[in-house]
Amino acid sequence: MGEKSFEDYNLSDEIKRGLALLKYETPTEVQNEVIPRALQNQNLIVKSQTGSGKTASFGIPLCEMIDWEGGHPQALILTPTRELAVQVQEDITAIGRVKGIKALAVYGKESFTKQEEELEQKTHIVVGTPGRVMDHIERETLLVDEINYLIIDEADEMLTMGFVAQVEAIIKKLPLNKVTMVFSATLPKKVENLCHNYMKNPISIQIASAEITTSAIDHCVMKVKEAGKMSLLKNLTVIENPKSCIIFCRTKRQVNTVFAELERSNYSCEKIHSGIVQEDRFAVMEGFKIGNFRYLVATDVAARGIDVAKITLVINYDVPMEKESYVHRTGRTGRAGNKGKAITFATPNDSKLLKAIEYYIGFEIPVREAPMQQKVVDHKNVHSDKAIMKLYFTGGKKKKLRAVDFVGTIAKLPGVTADDIGMITIQDEWTYVDILNGKGSLVLQAMKETAIKGKKLKVSKANIR
């Protein structure tokens, strides 16, 4: 695999230039298997784990084969969530940038009229969730007569979420001679039935199961009673001091509880679950991607569709009920050549779930002892020795200020970088910003003369740590 390069696929200069801009050099295993077959218009069923490079495996041949002059959409990509639709649309746009490929994401909870207006313009590829795609087809705002390619991404998740009837209805509206490619982390019976019913002579590609959990992830289990989880969580955040961390819970209620406690303790955190309106969920994900906060507390709704290369730690606050969820959760770390760590909290009642997960992933997850209290205290002292100064600003949400505004302004000060900025806590009327590495006094003086988003705020050293 290492000897292969994208030059071997006889791609156009426009696509090769697009890949060069993205620093794509060596194809991944799934790309090696899929790209040449997709370029030959073969129907494919691809079993490949999240994080394996599958979006580019279909995105590259799509962008290559699309006729730029075409008047109507030529490819349709179905995804289970809005977040994944946007991510795929962004990836496709980046790959086809030099060629001028236009990809549009359509999904619910956003203006139908706005999407209709976009679809009236030249659009080569449409990415969307089944419900909104079907709405557009039925209202004839999405014309499908020229759809040559159908991609069903995260098929197992799509069908688990109850979209099977909508997916089948969409397939029946598309031209019979289209090429279909199905991508799935697992191949449950529902996915197999869908493929056999609607695909002609598909080729099956299964990427080696060794990729089910990448060697870049350090897995471990910590035994704990339910009542001791929060204390263990806080201790681990001190010991691990992650740059970016997702804390997974089973239920919305548990997410709310964990988030509330972390927020009370001044953690830089946000939460996401299906009970949060999609617009807010999307905003949270964007904030997490750009580093506005360090900890994201989430249900499995966030396990897919997140592509943040520098998540250093995943904590399973609750053992997932589904073994596949363990793979998708932990697969958020150890990406893009980075190392990651996955720590699972297991209560005495979790033994059966844990055994099922271990059987599925093919190895026993090592058990590690919870950190001793003295070690936690020592780490806290080390962190405090790094000279953190908390600054208080007289402005917050009511002045439409966001964490990114503070980071963008402070990181531009002479002698300061984004690495010198720690936790940011924004309330309606005020904001706290932790300045690290002994740069507090420097930032304090500079910000007395510097506006944030055009607003001059009073700044002082905070009275709390």
Image (cartoon, rainbow, N blue to C red):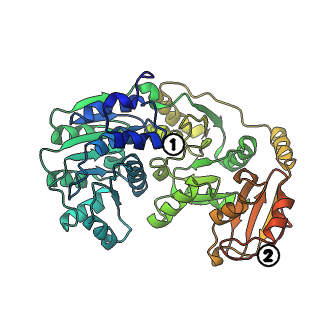
Give the structural element (helix, strand or loop) at label 2.
Answer: loop
Q: Is residue 422 left or right of residue 115?
A: right
Instruction: Give the residue furthest to the front.
Output: 13
Snapshot quadrant of residue 127:
bottom left
Pick whichever, 74 or 270, lies toward us: 74
How many angstroms separate mark 1 from mark 2 (CA)? 42 Å
Instruction: Give the residue furthest to the left.
Output: 176
- Amino acid at the residue labelled 1: Arg
Picture residue at 51% right of the left edge, 30% below the top: 214
Q: Is residue 67 left or right of residue 290?
A: left
Residue 23: image x %, image y %?
A: 49, 39
Label ID, residue 49:
none
Residue 99: image x %, image y %?
A: 34, 49
Query: Marks 1 and 2: which is nearer the front?
Result: 2
Picture residue at 35% right of the left edge, 62% below the top: 107
Q: Is residue 139 left or right of residue 265?
A: left
User: Is residue 454 at least partly visible in the picture?
Assistant: yes
Quickly name the residue at label 2: 458
Residue 66: image x %, image y %?
A: 25, 47
Give the structural element (helix, strand or loop) at label 1.
Answer: helix
Residue 396: image x %, image y %?
A: 68, 73
Snapshot quadrant of residue 345:
top right
Location of residue 300 with respect to 50 vertically, above or below: below
- Amino acid at the residue labelled 2: Lys
Location of residue 5 with respect to 417 vertically, above or below: above
Snapshot quadrant of residue 373:
top right
Q: Quadrant for the N terminus, please.
A: top left
Pick whichever, 285 or 40, lies toward us: 40
Which is more N-terminal, label 2 or label 1? 1
Quickly name the residue at label 1: 329
